[in-house]
């Protein structure tokens, strides 16, 4: 199944801004972050098709996964 993965801010460094890739059925955002060597504790926002989701959400064919890092500051 094809999933489009969009990375934002520091997650793009050494990776990509967006790509579409074929993944096995039942994959989750946590599986994809692990594959990309992005520690789960650094993920601030997970969106699937523009809606908030959890890292354990099961993705479906054609989904768009957007990953944003935690934002610091004050």
Image (cartoon, rainbow, N blue to C red):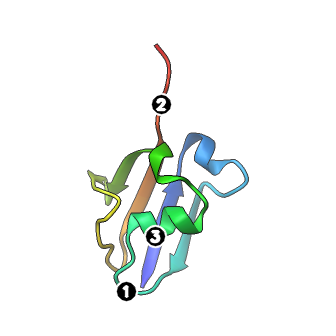
Query: Quick check: 65 left or right of 6?
Result: left
Frontmost of labels 1 and 3 is 3
Q: Secondary structure at mark 3?
A: helix
Q: Earlier in the sequence, mark 2 or mark 1?
A: 1
Labels 2 and 1 touching (C-beta < 8 A) = no
Give the farthest residue toward the top.
74
| Percent of width and height locating residue 44 | 41, 42
Labels 1 and 3 touching (C-beta < 8 A) = no
Q: Residue at the location (34% across, 82% down)?
A: 26
Which one is nearer the viewer's eye here, 53 or 22?
Answer: 53
Estimate the spatial distance between the alpha carbons at disc 2 and disc 3, rounded to whole Å. Answer: 22 Å
Estimate the spatial distance between the alpha carbons at disc 2 and disc 1, rounded to whole Å. Answer: 31 Å
| Percent of width and height locating residue 57 | 29, 66
Q: Earlier in the sequence, mark 1 or mark 3?
A: 1
Q: Report which residue position mark 1 lands on.
A: 25
Vertically, is 26 above or below 58?
below
Estimate the spatial distance between the alpha carbons at disc 1 and disc 3, rounded to whole Å. Answer: 12 Å
Labels 2 and 3 touching (C-beta < 8 A) = no
- Tell me the crowding category of disc 3: few under 14, some 14 to 19, or many 20 or more residues within 10 angstroms, Cα based: some
Q: Report which residue position mark 2 lands on.
A: 71
Quadrant into which the N terminus falls: bottom left
- Tell me the crowding category of disc 1: few under 14, some 14 to 19, or many 20 or more residues within 10 angstroms, Cα based: few
Q: Earlier in the sequence, mark 2 or mark 3?
A: 3
| Percent of width and height locating residue 74 | 46, 13
Q: Report which residue position mark 3 lands on.
A: 31
| Percent of width and height locating residue 22 | 51, 83
Q: Residue at the location (31% across, 53% down)?
A: 50
- Tell me the crowding category of disc 2: few under 14, some 14 to 19, or many 20 or more residues within 10 angstroms, Cα based: few
């Amino acid at each position: 199944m094809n999933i489009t993965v969009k990375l934002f801010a520091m997650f793009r460094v050494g990776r990509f801004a967006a790509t579409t890739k074929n993944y096995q059925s039942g994959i989750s955002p946590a599986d994809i972050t692990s594959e990309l060597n992005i520690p789960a504790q650094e993920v601030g926002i997970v969106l699937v098709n523009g809606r908030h989701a959890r890292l354990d959400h099961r993705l479906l064919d054609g989904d768009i996964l957007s990953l944003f890092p935690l934002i610091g500051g004050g």
